Each structure stands twice: as C-alpha cells, then as structure tokens.
Image (cartoon, grey):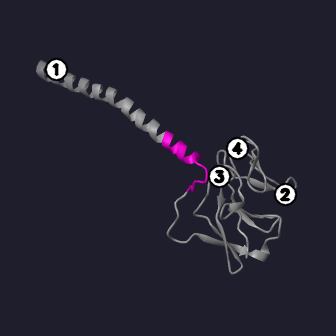
C-alpha cells in the first residue's frame, strides 16, 4: 500500500470513530427519552393499556344467573376473574399481577388474590392488600346484554385503586 493510500484509510477510520463518538450520546439521550415516556405512560391512572380492536373482542362469559352473588370465577382462557360483588355488580379483573406480570390465583379461604412470585395480595375489588404491587389489578369493561355477561378483553384498564364506576350491574 502506498503512503498516500494508507494516510487516506487512516483518515477515514479516524473520521468514522469521531462520528461514532459524537453519535453515542445522542443515541443514549433518545433511548432515555423513550424510556421516560414509556414509564410515564404506564403509570398514568385510568389508562387503557391496549388499543381497542375494530373487530369485536367482547367475550360472553356466561349468563347473569350463572354467577352467584359474592363469588369469583376464574377464566384462564381470557386471563380474567369475573367477580360478582356482594351487591350483585360485576367486575372483571385481570389475572396478571400489576407488579411484574405473574399470574395471580384466587385464594377462597382468605378471600384474596395471591401472587406466587413476590406475595402481593389483592382484595375482591383488586385493591392491593399486600405489597410489593403498588396498584390494583387491571380491569376490563363489562356489559350485560339480554342476560349475558360480556367482557371486552381488548380493553385492559389500568387503575390505582377500585372505584364504584368500574362495576357493571344487570338492569
Ligand atoms: S409479580 Fe406479582 S408480586 Fe411480583
């Protein structure tokens, strides 16, 4: 290789190194900004976690009379619990722990949902009764039509805690 060619190649390599050295902080800033936006978005209360699907994702879980007052029905296929409250209202809770995403199970004797991963526990409304989970279980909107209980599994709703507006009643 001639000295002139060798100098040119060295200059090219040095130019690339300079570019990469300058580009890395920018890439880091963009990644940090995206992470920050993602985190803020995830922590917003009342946030719908998934976009509505134009195709109906209303799942018929059963007839109103199939669910006793003050009962919890586990639906593993749709990854939810259908809770019929003491006052007859329906609440569909996500089976996924709000801490780090393990599947929670209903513990009937202790009337709470328990997560096997880090022992978070939730009451019948999905409220946290034992940390480390910091917010209630997500819920899905329920509609009741012609005596059928339907849950829109495409609309997983994030929340800090239970609110009466999350319960649906048969008319
Ligand atoms: S994933 Fe449920 S307590 Fe950690």
Q: Count of labels shown? A: 4
Q: Give the spatial CA distance, label 3 vs label 4.
A: 12 Å
> Is the CB of the residue bearing disc 4 within 8 angstroms of ligand 1?
yes
Measured from the top left, where is residue 135 in percent x and y? 68, 47
Measured from the top left, where is residue 157 in percent x and y? 61, 57
Which quarter of the figure has residue 19?
top left
User: Which residue lies most toward the right here?
Assistant: 109
Q: Which residue is mark 1?
A: 7
* Residue 100 belongs to the span the image colors magenta: no
> Is the CB of the residue bearing disc 3 within 8 angstroms of ligand 1?
no
User: Which residue lies most toward the bottom here?
Assistant: 146
* Residue sitting nearer the eye, 5 or 92: 92
Quick check: 69 above or below 20? below
Q: Give the spatial CA distance, label 2 vs label 4.
A: 20 Å
Q: Earlier in the sequence, mark 3 or mark 4?
A: 4
Q: Residues within 10 Å of mark 3 (few under 14, many from 20)?
A: many
- The disc at residue 108 is 2
Q: Which residue is mark 3?
A: 159
Per the rendered image, the range of residues in magenta is 36-49
Q: Earlier in the sequence, mark 3 or mark 1?
A: 1
| SS type, badge 4 | loop
Residue contact between numbered discs 4 and 1, judged by CB atoms under 8 Å: no
Q: Earlier in the sequence, mark 3 or mark 2?
A: 2
Q: Residues within 10 Å of mark 1 (few under 14, many from 20)?
A: few
Q: Earlier in the sequence, mark 4 or mark 1?
A: 1
Residue contact between numbered discs 3 and 4, judged by CB atoms under 8 Å: no
| SS type, badge 2 | loop
Q: Which residue is mark 4?
A: 133
């Amino acid at each position: 290789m001639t000295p002139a060619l060798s100098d040119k190649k060295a200059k090219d390599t040095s130019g690339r190194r300079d570019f990469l050295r300058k580009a890395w902080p920018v890439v880091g800033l963009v990644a940090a900004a995206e992470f920050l936006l993602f985190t803020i978005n995830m922590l917003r209360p009342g946030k719908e976690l998934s976009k509505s699907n134009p195709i109906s994702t209303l799942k018929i879980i059963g007839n109103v009379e199939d669910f006793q007052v003050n009962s919890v029905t586990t639906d593993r296929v749709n990854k939810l619990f259908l809770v019929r409250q003491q006052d007859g209202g329906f609440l569909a809770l996500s089976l996924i722990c709000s801490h780090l995403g393990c599947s929670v199970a209903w513990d009937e004797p202790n009337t709470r949902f328990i997560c096997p991963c880090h022992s978070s526990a939730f009451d019948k409304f999905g409220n946290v009764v034992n940390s480390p989970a910091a917010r209630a279980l997500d819920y899905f909107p329920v509609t009741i039509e012609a005596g059928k209980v339907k849950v829109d599994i495409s609309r997983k709703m994030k929340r800090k805690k239970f609110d009466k507006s999350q319960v649906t009643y048969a008319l």
